[in-house]
Image (cartoon, rainbow, N blue to C red):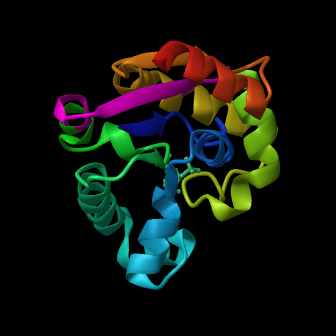
Amino acid sequence: MKLVLIGYMGSGKTSVGKHLASKLDFLFYDLDKEIETRVGQSIAQLFSEKGEIYFRKIESELVNSITHSKEKLILATGGGTPCYGDTMKNLLSCDNVITIYLKTSLHILTDRLYKEKSERPLIAHITTRDVLNDFIRKHLFERSHYYYRALITINVDELSVSEISEAIILKLF
Ligand code: S3P
C-alpha cells in the first residue's frame, strides 16, 4: 500500500507523513527532499536557476517512480504536485495508491505560510499578510479541483498531527 498525501503548502503533509509512517512502520518520502537530492540544489535554487517548468518535470518523474515501487510507503507531495500534467490521473489509476487530501482553511494557511514563506519560491516575494491571503485564496480555488479528486479528504483544521494520523488510520482500516 502507498499513501500519497496531497494539499496546499502549509497543510502539514510532511509532519503528518512522518508521524503516520512511524505509526504504520511504512517508509517515508518527502517529494521536495527527493527532488533536492536528485538535482543537488534546494527547491529555491532550482526555481531560480532552472525555472518552474524544469522543477515540474523532475517532480512528475519522481512521483511516478516512487509510487510505482513495491514498498509500503507514505509520500508527502508538494502543494502543486497533483495539479500539473497527468499526475493526479496517474495517481488515481496506480495500483495500491491511496490519495489523501489534507484540507486546510484559508486563514490557517495564511497564518502558517506568512511565517514560513521565505523557503517557498511561489510566495517568498509577497510582503503583506493581506496580499498573501488573496494569493492563497485564488491559488487554492484553482487547485482545489485537483485536491478534491483524492480518495480520502480529511478536514485537518482543528486536529493535531497525531489526531490527523488517527483519522487517516480510521478511514483506511
Ligand atoms: C509548491 C509547494 C512546495 C514545493 C514548491 C512548489 C507548490 O511544497 O514543492 O515550492 O507549487 O505549491 P510544500 O507544499 O511542501 O510547501
> Horizontal and vertical percent for residue 56?
32, 58
Specify the segment rendered in magenta.
91-105
> Horizontal and vertical percent for residue 145?
36, 20
At 36% from the left and 77% from the top, the residue drawn is: 50
Q: Nearer the viewer, residue 38 or 128?
A: 38
Q: Nearer the viewer, residue 46 or 73?
A: 73
* Residue 103 falls in image quadrant: top right
* Residue 93 falls in image quadrant: top left
At 46% from the left and 58% from the top, the residue drawn is: 31
Q: Is residue 97 magenta?
A: yes
Q: Is residue 31 left or right of residue 71?
A: right
* Residue 21 falls in image quadrant: top right
Q: Nearer the viewer, residue 160 or 108?
A: 160
> Horizontal and vertical percent for residue 7?
52, 33
Vertical order, 64 against 55 (above or below)? above
Which quadrant of the rendered structure holds the N terminus?
top left
Q: Nearer the viewer, residue 75 or 25?
A: 25
User: Is residue 143 visible in the rendered structure shown here?
Assistant: no
At 44% from the left and 17% from the top, the residue drawn is: 152
Q: What is the number of callouts on the image?
A: 0
User: Is residue 20 visible in the rendered structure shown here?
Assistant: yes
Q: Is residue 58 magenta?
A: no
> Horizontal and vertical percent for residue 132?
69, 39
